[in-house]
Amino acid sequence: IAFGSETGTCEVVANSLARRLKLCAPKVMSLNDVLSQTNFPSHDYTHFLAICSTFGNGEPPSNAVRFFNSHLKAEKMREISWAVLGLGSSLYPKFCQAGKDLHTKLSQTGGNNLAKLTCIDGISSASQSGGIDKWYDLVYKRILPDSLLSDLANSLRISTNKENLHRETTYTMKWTPTMDLNEERLTELKPLSCSSDDTTSTCVNNVELFVDGDISLRSSRQVEFELPKGTTTTYETGDHLAVSPINDFELIQRFLLCFSHDLEKAANLNMISKKKGDDQTFSSIIRQAQQQFYIEAVDNEGQKEAFVDIEYLTNYSLLEVLQAHVDLSLSKGSYVNDLIEMMLQRLSTSSNISSNKHDIFEAFARSIQKGTDEDRLDAMARFPTIVHLLEEYGSLFCVPTPDSKSPPLLSIADVLVLMPRLNQRYYSISSSALTSPTRATITVGVVNIQTKYGVTVKGVCSHYLARLMPGDKAKVSVRKSTFRPPKDKGAPMVMIGGGTGIAPFMGFINERSKSWFTGSNAKTQECVLYFGCKSRNEILYRDLLASYKGANIMDLHLTMSAEPSLPKTYVQDKLQHDAKKVVKLLKTDNAHFYICGDARMAAGVTNTCVEILTKSGGMSRFAAVQLITQMQIENRWQLDVWGHADFSKVLKVKSVGRRSLGQSVTWSGFVVQDVEDK
C-alpha cells in the first residue's frame, strides 16, 4: 500500500486501509520508497494499492516524484492487481491530476485493474470520509472475497466478522533504556531543540508585524532564516518554505499524564527510584518518557504477531516522538474514525464498565461515525486534540477497570500506532531570491482560536515559529511552487491578498523594485496591490509598503474590515470601486492577476471579477468565464490559497439555448454545468 502525500492525509488513509487488510500483512510506504524494494514488482506481491494527492499545478507530492518518473517493467506488473485512490480539492484547476496520471501509468503496465479510478474531493470532510470508506469496502471485497476470507479465517482460527478482525490486535511497549534512568538530568522534561547539521536553518530575525501584537492573542510575525551553506537549498521567488514543527510542550505533558498508569508501571519495572520531595508519580513518568522503545503487536491470546515497523516510532525516545513525530490533533478523518472505532470495540469487550460516562461516550462516538460535517466540526470544537479527548474520557480507557483485575482498555502503544505523522507546514516565502538568495523570509499568522466550548486551540507550527529566537535552529526546506511573478519583469501585475496572503507579493514587489531602482524601468507597466486587513494596527509591512508606494513602484489599495473609524470594506469592494481599471487590466493581453489568502476570499474575488466583466466590460457571463479560464491556462491568473470554499455556485452558466457544452468543465472549483437542452 503506497502513498504520495504532502500534508499527511494520504499516509493516514494508507495506514487505515492496512489495518483493515491486516490478514494480508501489507507493507505501507511512500511511492518513492516502493522503488527501494528490490523485489518489486515481482510474483512476491499480489496487489498494489496507491493513494495519492496532487501538489502545486497538478504535480505529484515530493515523496512520489521518483516513482512517477520511474519505469515499471510491464512483464512483472502483469501479475499484480492494482487500484488508485486520488485525493484532491476542486478548488484547484487540475483536480486529482496526480491520481489520474498514476492511474494512467499503471494502466500502461497491463496489470489487473481492481477498480476504476476514484477521485475524492476534500472540500467536504463528511463526503470525503464517506467516499474513502466506500473505496475501502470495494477494495476489501475484491482482495478478500467472502470465500477467501472464510478459508483464511478457518486456517487462522478467527472470526470472519470484520469488527472482530479489527479487535484481535493490541499493542505493547517494549522499552530499551539507553541511559541511566536515575540520572539527575532526567528529573525535568526539556523541550526538544534541533541539532546543527546540513538539514537545519538558523533563525536570524523574528519580529512582530502588528502594532501591539501579542502571541497569545493576535499576532503576525516576520521570521527570517539563513539557509544552510554548502547545500542545494535554493529557492525562487514565489516558492514555499516547509517547516517541521514541534508540538506544544505543555500539551505533551498532559498527554503523558493521561497514561500515567502505563508509564509509572514501566518505571517501576525498570526500578526507577523516586527522588525525595518530587511528585513521585510525575518524576517516574519524566524518566520513563526519555527512554527509547519499540512496539509489538499481540494477538488476542497474548502471542506476538509482529514488530510494528513505523519509521517514526523506532529509535527515538517517547518524548522525542511526542514532540516532533506524531500529530496530536484530531483533524484527519480516517485517523479519527479508526480511533473512535477502536475505543468503541474496547468498551464492548469490557463487562465491568457501566456508567453514565460510558453512555455519553457511545453517543458521541456514533455522532462521529454517522454524522454530518457539522457533527464532526462540533466534535473538533470540543476535542481539538487527542489530549482533550483522553482527559474527558480517560477514566473509561486509561486506568484499570474498577475491579483492578484488568489493565486499562487503551495503552499508550494502542494510541501511538494510530496517531498520524506530524507533517511539515508550508509558508509562502516573502523575500525575493533575486535580492536575498541565501536568506528566506516567511510571514506567519499566529493561530489562536477559542471554540464555542471555550477550548483554546493554538496553532502548532505558528506558535513554534513565533517563539524562535535569533540563533535557534529549525528544520526547514524549500518546496517548489508554480506561483511566479511574470517572466516579463515589466508586465502589468495585479496582486490581491488578505492578511498573511500578502506574503509572496512582498517578494514580487521587491524583485520589481530592483529593476526600478537600477534604471531599467522604462518598460515597466502597472503594478497594483489590493490588500485587506482588519484594522490599522494590522497593516503588515506598513513602512515597506509606504516606501514602495512613495517611489511609484506600485499602486496600493488598502481595505479594512474592523477599523472602528471606517466603514467595513473588503478587497472585493475596492475592486468593484475600480471596475473600469480592473476591466482594462483583465483585457490586457500580458496582464497577470494573483490571488493569495483564504479560499473564501479567493472565491469572492473571482466572482467579483466576473461580475465586473459582465457589468462594466460588456461581456456575457460565459465569455467572462472563458476569459479568466484562458488567463489561467496561460499562467496569468494564479492562486496560492488555503482552506476550503464552496465554489460550485460562484460561476454557473444556466442557459445557452439548444447547443451543448458537452461535459462539465471545472476550473478552480467553478462549475460550468452541462446545459444541453433535454
Image (cartoon, helix red, strand yellow):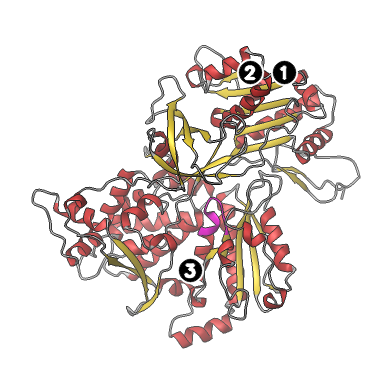
- x, y percent for residue 189: 25, 48
Tell me whether the residue at label 2 lies in contact with that at label 3, contact meaning CB atoms closer than 8 angstroms.
no
| Residue type, label 3 | Arg
Would you name the residue on which mark 3 appears?
A: 19
Residue visible at 47% across and 18% down in the picture: 537
User: Does the magenta-highlighted stretch encompass residue 11?
Assistant: yes
| Residue type, label 2 | His
Question: Toward the viewer: 337 or 252?
Answer: 252
User: Does the magenta-highlighted stretch encompass residue 77?
Assistant: no
Q: How far apart are marks 1 and 3 (CA)?
A: 56 Å
- x, y percent for residue 384: 41, 46
Question: Toward the viewer: 212 or 574?
Answer: 212
Residue placed furthest toward the front: 230
Would you name the residue on which mark 1 appears?
A: 578
Tell me whether the residue at label 1 lies in contact with that at label 2, contact meaning CB atoms closer than 8 angstroms.
yes
Q: Distance between the residues labelled 1 and 2?
A: 10 Å
Q: Which element type, helix, strand or loop, lies under badge 2?
A: strand
Q: Residues within 10 Å of mark 1 (few under 14, many from 20)?
A: few
Residue visible at 60% across and 53% down in the picture: 61
Q: Can residue 452 be seen in this view?
A: no
Q: Which element type, helix, strand or loop, lies under badge 1?
A: loop
Q: Where are the magenta residues, as a range?
A: 4-12
Q: Quadrant of the N terminus?
A: bottom right
Q: How crowded is mark 3: few (under 14 residues within 10 Å), some or many (20 or more)?
A: some
Residue placed furthest toward the right: 658
Q: Nearer the viewer, mark 2 or mark 3?
A: 2
| Residue type, label 1 | Asp
Q: Can residue 374 be seen in this view?
A: yes
Q: Which mark is residue 557?
A: 2
In the picture shown, does residue 78 fall above or below 484? below
Residue visible at 53% across and 63% down in the picture: 14
